[in-house]
Image (spheres, grey):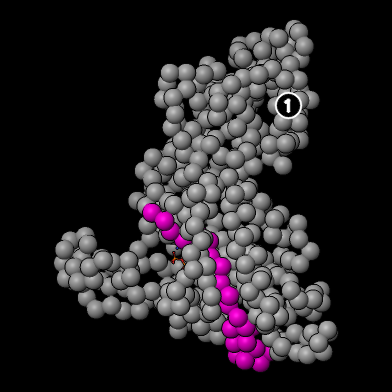
């Protein structure tokens, strides 16, 4: 993990939040490459779960909501973690994460009584949302009225959520300001099980599309006493992180809990009229949820590779081309030959107009440029040399993983790049 954190910082993926002031626990800032990687994950998710389907409605709800939302959803009373505080050093811990609940794991001091600690941030009576889900439940009727969808259908959104975690840790894994990609999928009350199973598979397929190693993915049934307050059945998708097997994604059967509570609390009827059966009922809901930061971390962990190439140790990120922030780097063989530079810039501009994530680099020797691109996970490097200009217009393409180079025409290069990111 230390190596990944250090590479992520040095190469402009992820910085500690407010670093020049000593940081702020549980916050991170995404740098230029981190933001590209994050957007790629979001786009793949949005395409798979929203645009490629006919039964999904995209949303972007406010982070700030009427406080009544959080009362009705059960978060004011139930969104808590068990906290214990050390009487000596005053450090706070999640009681359920401690092996010995009597003794402080840091200073050995005596631990106080276990208390329930509400994780919602609150300022002047307004909460920062701890999940994006409620923004969809409160807009359920709006979507029904505007689009008249038939069950089953879903609502999806990507956005920030905030949790006052007692002990933020493990880099992006447990932070206080996080991003979620969530779906609330509404079904007939007796039709939840099949849909649940289908989403369970979809979650794994999505992780494989991102390039994660299938041996590192595990789905685990959550015991009733460990489920969230709104869930009647939960399956977590866990991942082998460097600190152990931990939750990456969640899947919960939220029943009609949220819509029913909002109906009662707001006095607005959130039921659905079923044309087929001519009956009215409150739909049940299946919620697949995806933490964007945890996905980033999983991708970085699986991509981080050290090997020997050309007799030297190298570190590189073996990203799937689809998620790689930079897809291709274009180099002139020599920086001081105007003809090479001119041709390289021409190829660079052309590629930039057809795919995202193209960079130009003429700094240092070719070997150094390859290493720099390897470190940020660029799948292909293209070099323009004298043969490109004097002979046949072909360029060399170097493959990140094998280090192998081959000559291809510009048309072949376009095809290779388009195919690798499709
Ligand atoms: P945990 O048990 O690890 O605290 P959770 O069960 O509370 O997680 P959910 O409420 O199911 O998590 O949240 C949905 C998703 O949001 C999680 O699967 C995870 O990917 C992400 N997530 C939740 N809390 C955090 C956090 N503090 N930092 C980063 N991601 C988070």
Residue visible at 63% across and 64% down in the picture: 199
* Pointer 1 residue Cβ closer than 8 Å to ligand 1: no
Q: Position of residue 65 (x, y in %)?
A: 58, 76
Q: Quadrant of the N terminus?
A: top left
Residue visible at 37% across and 57% down in the picture: 169
**Residue lying farthest top?**
390
Q: Position of residue 118 (x, y in %)?
A: 41, 76
Q: Quadrant of residue 201?
A: bottom right
Q: Residues within 10 Å of mark 1 (few under 14, many from 20)?
A: some
Please give left or right for residue 191 compared with residue 130 in the image. Answer: right
Q: Is residue 278 magenta?
A: no
Q: Count every numbered label the image shows and give the total.
A: 1
User: Which residue in the structure is indicated by mark 1?
Assistant: 413
Under tag 1, what secondary structure? helix
Q: Position of residue 367 (x, y in %)?
A: 52, 19
Residue visible at 47% across and 22% down in the picture: 309
Please give left or right for residue 47 compared with residue 18 in the image. Answer: right
| Near-viewer residue (299 or 276) | 276
Residue 422, placed above or below residue 96? above
Q: Quadrant of the C terminus?
A: top right
Residue 40, placed above or below residue 363? below
| Near-viewer residue (66 or 166) | 166
Please give left or right for residue 376 compared with residue 62 in the image. Answer: left
Residue 61, placed above or below residue 239? below
Highlighted magenta segment, given as a residue range? 244-268
Residue 70, placed above or below residue 88? below
Residue visible at 66% across and 70% down in the picture: 195
Q: Position of residue 205 (x, y in %)?
A: 62, 54
């Amino acid at each position: 993990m230390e190596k990944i954190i250090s590479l992520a910082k040095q190469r402009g993926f992820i910085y500690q939040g407010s670093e020049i002031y000593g940081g702020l626990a549980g916050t991170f800032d995404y740098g230029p490459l981190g933001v590209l990687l994050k957007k790629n994950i979001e786009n793949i998710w949005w395409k798979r779960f929203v645009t490629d389907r006919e039964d999904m409605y995209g949303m972007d709800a406010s982070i700030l909501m009427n406080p009544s939302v959080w009362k009705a959803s059960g978060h004011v009373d139930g969104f808590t973690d068990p906290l214990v505080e050390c009487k000596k050093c005053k450090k706070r811990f999640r009681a359920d994460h401690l092996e010995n609940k009597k003794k402080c794991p840091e200073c050995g001091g005596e631990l106080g009584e276990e208390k329930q600690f509400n994780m919602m941030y609150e300022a002047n009576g307004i909460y920062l949302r701890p999940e994006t889900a409620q923004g969809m439940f409160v807009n359920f009727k709006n979507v029904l009225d505007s689009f008249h969808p038939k069950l089953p259908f879903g609502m999806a959104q990507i956005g920030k959520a905030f949790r006052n975690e007692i002990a933020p840790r493990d880099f992006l894994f447990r932070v206080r300001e996080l991003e979620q990609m969530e779906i609330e999928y509404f079904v007939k009350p007796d039709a939840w099980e099949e849909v649940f199973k289908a989403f369970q598979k979809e979650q794994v397929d999505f992780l494989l599309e991102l390039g994660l190693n299938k041996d590192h993915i595990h789905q685990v049934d959550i015991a009733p006493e460990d489920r969230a307050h709104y869930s009647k059945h939960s399956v977590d998708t866990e991942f082998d992180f460097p600190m152990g097997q931990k939750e990456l994604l969640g899947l919960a059967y939220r029943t009609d809990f949220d819509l029913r509570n909002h109906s009662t609390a707001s006095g607005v009827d959130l039921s659905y009229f079923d044309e087929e059966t001519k009956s009215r009922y409150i739909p049940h809901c299946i919620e697949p949820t995806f933490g964007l930061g945890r996905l980033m971390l999983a991708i970085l962990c699986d991509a981080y590779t050290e090997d020997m190439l050309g007799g030297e140790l190298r570190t590189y990120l073996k990203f799937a081309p689809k998620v790689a922030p930079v897809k291709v780097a274009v180099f002139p063989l020599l920086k001081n030959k105007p003809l090479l530079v001119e041709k390289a810039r021409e190829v660079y501009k052309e590629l930039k107009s057809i795919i995202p994530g193209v960079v130009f680099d003429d700094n240092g020797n070719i070997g150094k440029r390859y290493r720099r691109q390897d470190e940020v996970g660029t799948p292909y490097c293209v070099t323009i040399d004298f043969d490109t200009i004097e002979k046949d217009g072909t360029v060399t393409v170097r493959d990140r993983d094998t280090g192998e180079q081959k000559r291809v025409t510009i048309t072949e290069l376009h095809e290779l790049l388009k195919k690798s990111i499709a």
